[in-house]
Image (tube, rainbow, N blue to C red):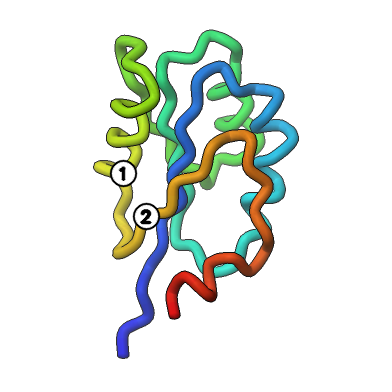
């Protein structure tokens, strides 16, 4: 049986402080293939922060500012995995939360 791949998509709009606090916790998650940040034309340097500190994260930029639904859809459309999990910037997930979802 093929092991399913998992993309984590995080919509962002001016979430610099939340990303600083919560992104290190997201990176501790086990079992994901990629993390995608879908940015809704932030102007708070959040994307520069991610590029500098987490170059392994895929960034997709929305131009112009489109709102939550369009931004999350943009992230999902650019994910490469079998399963997409959407997390908001204010979420601190448990390290092994993906395992039960795959079962």
Does 59 appear above or below 56? above
Horizontal side, residue 38 vs residue 52: left or right: left
Of all residues, the one furthest to the left in this rendering is 77
Q: Name the residue under label 1.
A: 76
Secondary element at tag 2? strand
Quadrant where the N terminus is found in the figure:
bottom left
> Relative to residue 81, is residue 36 depicted above or below?
above
In which quadrant of the rendered view does residue 34 lie? Answer: bottom left
> In which image quadrant can residue 2 be found?
bottom left
- The percent position of residue 95, horizontal first and vertical second, equals 67, 63
Tell which circle, 1 or 2, labels the residue nearer the N-terminal end.
1
Residue found at x 33% / y 28%: 69
Q: SS class of the residue under badge 1?
A: helix
Which residue is at 54% across, 24% downward? 47
Give 93 or 4, whichever is nearer the viewer.
Answer: 93
Q: How far apart are marks 1 and 2 (CA)?
A: 7 Å
The x and y percentages for residue 98 are 53, 67
Name the residue located 36 percent from the left edge and 34 percent from the top edge: 72
Assess disc 1: are there few (<14), some (14-19) or many (≥20) residues with their C-alpha within 10 Å of its C-alpha: many
Label pair 1/2, CB-CB below 8 angstroms: yes
According to the picture, the residue beneath numbered tag 2 turns out to be 84
Tell whether 92 sits left or right of 85. right
């Amino acid at each position: 049986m093929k092991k399913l791949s998992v993309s984590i998509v995080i919509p962002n709009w001016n979430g610099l402080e939340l990303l600083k606090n919560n992104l290190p916790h997201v990176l501790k998650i086990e079992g994901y293939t990629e993390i995608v940040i879908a940015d809704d034309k932030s102007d708070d340097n959040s994307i520069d922060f991610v590029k500098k500190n987490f170059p392994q994260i895929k960034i997709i930029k929305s131009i112009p500012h489109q709102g939550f639904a369009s931004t999350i859809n943009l992230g999902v459309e650019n994910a490469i995995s079998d399963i997409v999990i959407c997390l908001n910037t204010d979420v601190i997930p448990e390290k092994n939360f993906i395992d039960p979802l795959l079962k």
